Amino acid sequence: MSNVLILADFVSGKATKTNAELATAGARIGEVTAVVLAPAGKGAAMASEINKGPVSKVVIVESDAFVNNGVAAVADVLAQIIAAQSPAAVLIASHAFGKEVAARTAVKSGSGIITDAVDVSSDVTATQLVFGGSTTVHSKVSHGTPIITVRPNSIDAQTAAATPAVETLSLQVSDASKKATVTSSQPPVQGGRPELTEANIVVSGGRGTNGDFSAVEGFADSLGAAVGASRAATDAGWYPHSYQVGQTGKTVSPQLYVACGISGAIQHRAGMQTSKTIVVINKDPEAPLFEIADFGVVGDLFAVLPKATEGVKARKS
Ligand SMILES: Cc1cc2nc3c(=O)[nH]c(=O)nc-3n(C[C@H](O)[C@H](O)[C@H](O)COP(=O)(O)OP(=O)(O)OC[C@H]3O[C@@H](n4cnc5c(N)ncnc54)[C@H](O)[C@@H]3O)c2cc1C
């Protein structure tokens, strides 16, 4: 059976649920090996978190260069593993870090790359949604090892507990990959809410909030959701740019996306229209976002959201 590598995904040292999604996609192609690239002494602890989804084996490589030299060191070692194992495919989470690792690894291993896949089939065909989600593209890498980045939340993960075999490899990061050094980094401020690109539910606010996100945040918290924002809201300084959803912000694909006071410009849709269920709250019945809504509420968000929040809380208690 062919071997598929997934690059184990961690945020601030914690394994993300994207790992199970990558493993589920990988298992359609072959036996899944998760590659854990860890700082010295942290490999075993990090590998123990890769215990969900169909992972057959975990390979650990330890080096402080993964922290000190970032993507260059990660791509260097990943390319060495590809050269040694000739996997049928390599799957990586499709966020900024993952895409840069994928690009560098593709160059190093002389391979083709596909980014932002929303699905991968057993014959390593990737599905992408392009032009703001209006066009579906199926493509295959024709040269080298297919290196594919997969959008978080796109694949229904098998999350049954796994007991993968664990192997530690002794590989060196080349001096060429240590030329740029990370001098400092700050973990993202989570504020207790889930990470935007990973969240199952996202509640977003736009210009309709008029700068007051309290109703949006209250509803998000009642659902355990992440908060997002339109560019109108982030450009106005009402919400940090790191929460912007859309073409020039983050791409999200949650089970439920609730848009509050957002008109539905094409640039906003580009970042959210692959959400499984879309709920739109807008006081203008002609707002374009209603066109792609599964459920729409024509009303003032400051009246609708507190009622919805009360309703959710009442059902929980
Ligand atoms: C190159 C480029 C890239 C861009 N990238 C992005 C991007 O990544 N993300 C993004 O979002 N935008 C992006 N934009 C901007 C985009 O074109 C829109 O300007 C923006 O999305 C509008 O945000 P909005 O829907 O919040 O505001 P508006 O379009 O002003 O809509 C506000 C909506 O709120 C409703 N409303 C007002 N008050 C209430 C209320 N009390 N209750 C309920 N509804 C109310 C109104 O009816 C209206 O529909 C980009 C633009 C360009 C040119």
Image (tube, helix red, strand yellow):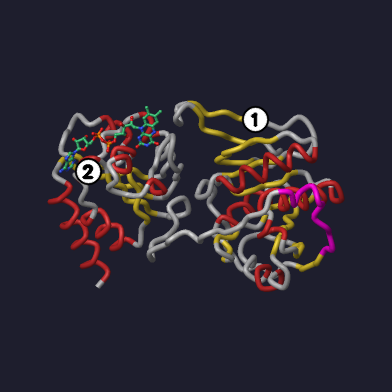
User: Are the residues at dot 2 and dot 1 in contact (C-beta closer than 8 Å)?
Assistant: no
| Numbered tag placed on residue 281 in the rendering | 2
Q: Quadrant of residue 275?
A: top left
Range shown magenta: 169-179
Residue at image point 63% right, 43% down = 100
Q: Quadrant of residue 274?
A: top left
Residue at image point 25% right, 53% down = 216
Q: Quadrant of ligand 1?
A: top left
Q: Is residue 173 magenta?
A: yes
Q: Is residue 226 magenta?
A: no
Which is more toward the observer, 24 or 235?
235
**In the rendered image, the vertical position of residue 78 relative to residue 58, given as above or below:** above
In the rendered image, residue 66, in percent from the top left (x then y), is placed at 69, 58
Q: Main secondary structure of the magenta part?
A: loop
**In the rendered image, the vertical position of residue 187 relative to residue 123, given as above or below:** below
Which is more toward the observer, 186 or 89?
186
In the rendered image, residue 162, in percent from the top left (x then y), is placed at 66, 67
**Label 2 residue SS:** strand
Residue at image point 61% right, 37% down = 115
- Report, in whole angstroms, how far the alpha carbon at label 2 lies from the one at label 1: 36 Å
Q: Is residue 187 left or right of residue 126?
A: left
Q: Is residue 202 left or right of residue 211?
A: right
Residue kind at label 2, given as amino acid type: Ile
| Numbered tag placed on residue 139 in the rendering | 1
Residue kind at label 1, given as amino acid type: Ser
In the rendered image, residue 57, in percent from the top left (x then y), is placed at 75, 62
Which is more toward the observer, 80 or 280?
80
**Label 1 residue SS:** strand
Q: Earlier in the sequence, mark 2 or mark 1?
A: 1
In the rendered image, residue 180, in percent from the top left (x then y), is placed at 69, 49
Mark 2 lies within 8 Å of ligand 1 (Cβ measured): yes
Residue at image point 25% right, 45% down = 260
